[in-house]
C-alpha cells in the first residue's frame, strides 16, 4: 500500500489526478468553513468565512520568502561541497 501512495505522489504521470484531488480537498474545506458557527468569534476578522485559510496561506508564503532570503541573501546557506 505504501508503495502505491509513494508512486502516486512521486510520479509525474499522476499530476492531473493529484491536482484534482487537492482542489477537491480545498473545495471541501471552503464549504466546511461556511458551516462553522461564528457567534463566539472575538474579533471582526474571525467572523469572515475563509479568514483562517487566507491567514494560513499568507503566513506560509511569507515564511518561505523569509527563509529563502535568509538562505540566499544573508549567507546562511552554503554550497553543496562546502564540507568536502
Image (cartoon, rainbow, N blue to C red):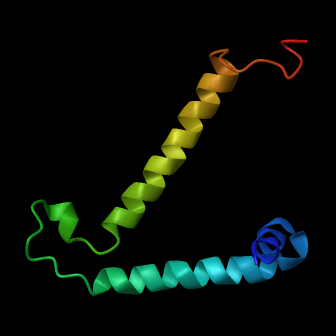
The quadrant holding residue 9 is: bottom right
Q: Nearer the viewer, residue 55 or 13?
A: 13
The quadrant holding residue 8 is: bottom right
The quadrant holding residue 15 is: bottom right
Residue found at the far front of this picture: 1
Q: Is residue 61 left or right of residue 14?
A: left
Q: Residue at x 65, y 82 (%)?
A: 21
Q: Nearer the viewer, residue 1 or 7?
A: 1
Q: Residue at x 52, y 78 (%)?
A: 26
Measuring from the top left, give residue 18's x and y in whole percent.
Answer: 72, 77
Measuring from the top left, give residue 16's x and y in whole percent.
Answer: 79, 80
Q: Residue at x 64, y 32 (%)?
A: 68
Q: Is residue 5 above or below residue 28?
A: above
Q: Is residue 24 left or right of residue 41?
A: right
Q: Residue at x 76, y 18 (%)?
A: 78
Q: Nearer the viewer, residue 54 or 8?
A: 8
Which quarter of the rendered picture does the C terminus lie within? top right
Amino acid at each position: 500500500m505504501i508503495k502505491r501512495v509513494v508512486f502516486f505522489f512521486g510520479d509525474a504521470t499522476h499530476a492531473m489526478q493529484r491536482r484534482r484531488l487537492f482542489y477537491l480537498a480545498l473545495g471541501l474545506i471552503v464549504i466546511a468553513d461556511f458551516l462553522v458557527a461564528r457567534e463566539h468569534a472575538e474579533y471582526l476578522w474571525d467572523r469572515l468565512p475563509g479568514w483562517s485559510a487566507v491567514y494560513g496561506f499568507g503566513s506560509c508564503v511569507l515564511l518561505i520568502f523569509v527563509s529563502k532570503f535568509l538562505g540566499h541573501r544573508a549567507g546562511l546557506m552554503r554550497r553543496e561541497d562546502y564540507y568536502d
